[in-house]
Amino acid sequence: MKKILLFVTLTLLVSCSFNQTFSNRESDRDDAEKISKKFYRELLQGTNKDKIYELFSDKFFEVTSKDQLDKLISDSQQEYGVIKENNLEHWETLVVKGSNSKSEYLLTYNVTRESGTTKETFSMLKEDENIKIVGYHINYILPDE
């Protein structure tokens, strides 16, 4: 009987998952912001597209090709102008440590450009200890009239 009880107890312990969840920690935001800052820095320098591609997850490129990303960046620069300033407007993070670990980040920037303002959103995940961009969206903000 003791062996059965020990077996059941061990089985329950092994099948349990132990996780620790952190939501909206500033340190996690800072880690994600490093990636978006690199992205904007590389855009301004504009010399090496491969450095931009390295910031993106393979999951991103399963949905969006590098040519499509290049076109998005090029079209936004032609239509709204070169980026003059970007300010973090909103952010959310969720980091789970433990047996079901994951790290998710969402950063939204107000981006001032030569000919208008855009709202740009980055969705990121941590993959193999590196934060990678899995989503990038640009929305034009209509000027107040």
Image (cartoon, helix red, strand yellow):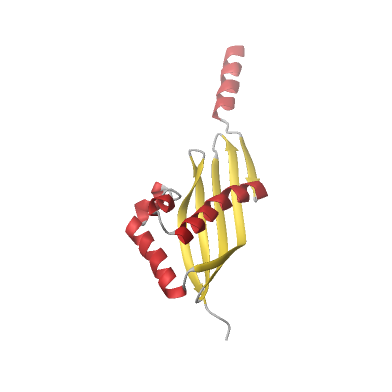
What percent of the width, then of the height, locates residue 77?
43, 69
Please tell me whether residue 22 is drawn above or below residue 74 in the rendered image.
above
Whether residue 1 is visible to the viewer of this picture, yes or no, is no
How many numbered marks, from 0 up? Answer: 0
Please tell me whether residue 4 is drawn above or below residue 45 in the rendered image.
above
Q: Residue at x 54, y 68 (%)?
A: 84
Q: Residue at x 36, y 57 (%)?
A: 64
Q: Residue at x 41, y 64 (%)?
A: 73
Q: Is residue 133 left or right of residue 65?
A: right
Quadrant position of the C terminus in the picture: bottom right
What percent of the width, then of the height, locates residue 45?
46, 58
What percent of the width, then of the height, locates residue 20?
63, 38
Whether residue 124 is visible to the viewer of this picture, yes or no, is yes
Q: Residue at x 62, y 50 (%)?
A: 30
Quadrant position of the N terminus in the picture: top right
Q: Which residue reaches farthest right? A: 26
What percent of the width, then of the height, locates residue 114?
51, 74
Q: Give the camera-side residue of 35 and 42.
A: 42
Q: Give the camera-side residue of 12 and 104.
A: 104
Q: Quadrant of residue 13?
A: top right
